[in-house]
Image (cartoon, rainbow, N blue to C red):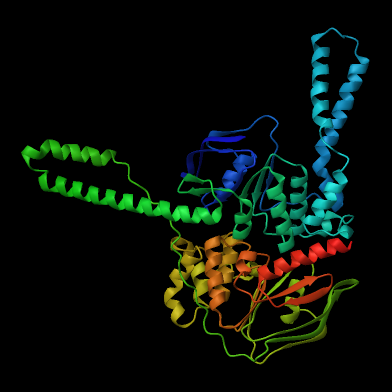
Amino acid sequence: MVSVDGLTVEFGGTTLFSDISFVINEKDRIALMGKNGAGKSTLLKILAGVRTASRGTVSAPKDTVIAYLPQHLMTEDGRTVFEEASQAFAHLYEMEAELDRMNNELATRTDYESDEYMALIEEVATKSEKFYAIDMTHFEEDVEKTLLGLGFERKDFGRQTSEFSGGWRMRIELAKMLLRNPDVLLLDEPTNHLDIESIGWLEEFLVSNGKAVVVISHDRKFVDNITTRTIEVTMGRIYDYKVNYSQYLVLRAERRQQQMKQYEEQQKMIQETKDFIERFKGTYSKTLQVQSRVKMLEKLEIIEVDEEDTSALRLKFPPSPRAGQYPVIMDGVGKAFGDKRIFSGATLTIERGNKVAFVGRNGEGKSTLVKCIMKELEHEGSLQLGHNVQIGYFAQNQASLLDEELTVFQTIDDVAKGEIRNKIRDLLGAFMFGGEASTKKVKVLSGGERTRLALLKLLLEPVNLLILDEPTNHLDLKTKDILKQALQDFDGTLICVSHDRDFLDGLVTKVYEFGHGKVREHLCGIYEFLAAKKMEELSELERK
């Protein structure tokens, strides 16, 4: 359906990828994989037509509709949420107006025998067939269904888009995209601004929709659940696997093993050839053999082994200072901003060593309760912190609080204590700040890089209550695994606000659900909670 042929991208004297070709077929659900900087987002932009390649072509049938969701965008102000989402159908209204214009023209013209008149009749017939094949009667229902699925409530439909944060605007844009019913969906990190329920809805939509999808995502579970094919971008080439992400990892390891074997055999042969040349280069009887081997070495294509992220470091927290048995005790805690009630009656006790998740739809009060625990907000009810509680806090804006004039290395060197100081270089390498990157000043880092640095800084401070608010949004899968392992080994107490199911799985043993102004406790892991939620939702449907 979409054909990529001989694509090459060069800029600043470097080649991002060279001469790559593949086809996106109808119903393909593809994950684009590769390390940061490999060119995944660039490739997606080229497919979307918002960027051009240095060489090569992207072609698709004339009527193919390609929709692209970038990582960052802004919805126009001046419309309500419902009106903005309904813009997905604007092209249909334009089509209807165009048909009316042509029909009026047919009614007024009298040159019935002319070629132009016949051509106009043909165009009207073609466009009418296309237009009337689209069922517009249910479009309001579709808009409603999509907005509800992405986490909006009915009362939000009439609100201005300007009242919503960037994350919610992203959802409106995603809703418009899905409503357009494109042939190919291009999604760049679509889950970053979605809560667990909305991610589940999006998964189901993409799988049942039956259209082609190309997605870049660091949410392993999401990628595994929706994709059936994995294209890896590495070292300027692509490798195409007809499997999902988990199976791709197995096949990739096998491929790399083969490459390693071939590389070692070639290196051995090269060394033997060089030894022969060195030994006999002054020997008259061997002159032809020596020359032949020199030429062979010159023409030899060196086998390359794919880059391997060697950051298999096990990140260890420093032992946490001893705290009281109950680091957090709440009784009847509530919070309202003016007339807007966020939650009330939150009563919970978090024991020392507990690892708990705060989950729920956006805007239900997860981050608000965290700020109450941090004593940044006044609240109703009683909230006590236990004896000797030392809080380490990672917020989504944590990256902006770093000292911009320090280098990456200095930022970490300032907080590293004891034995870990000898491993600063390894730590920085594990968080993708190896080599020259460690000498960069904080002010030149991208948003994602700053997030990683802020997270690493936090991991080195001796605390006994860790509070993490969406820590995985900018982390790739490798770094996420390192962080998860470190948190599993952490001997203190953890509160994690996250929508990343794979990250929470095996990490937390208790889930606090925020919704409809209440905080409910679930004594189980994240998947047991999700399974129970499904059952609850089904029983609610039956009651209606």
Measured from the top left, where is residue 338 in percent x and y? 89, 73
Q: Which of 469 and 146 is in front in this view?
A: 146
Image quadrant where one finds the C terminus = bottom right
In which quadrant of the rendered view does residue 435 lie?
bottom left
As displayed, is residue 425 above or below residue 245? below
Image quadrant where one finds the N terminus = top right
In which quadrant of the rendered view does residue 223 lie?
bottom right
Image-based side of 172 in relation to 280, left or right? right
Q: Which of 303 and 474 is in front in this view?
A: 303
Image-based side of 499 in relation to 414, left or right? right
Image-based side of 449 in relation to 367, left or right? left
Q: Which residue is drawn at 56% across and 68% down?
A: 453
As displayed, is residue 442 above or below residue 390? above
Measured from the top left, where is residue 185 in percent x and y? 67, 44
Image-based side of 246 in relation to 535, left or right? left
Q: Residue at x 82, y 22 (%)?
A: 125
Measured from the top left, where is residue 150 in percent x and y? 77, 56
In which quadrant of the rendered view does residue 371 lie?
bottom right
Measured from the top left, where is residue 335 in percent x and y? 83, 77
Q: Nearer the viewer, residue 27 or 95?
A: 27
As displayed, is residue 512 above or below residue 312? below
Q: Which residue lies furthest to the top in this view?
A: 113
Is residue 79 in view from this perspective?
A: no
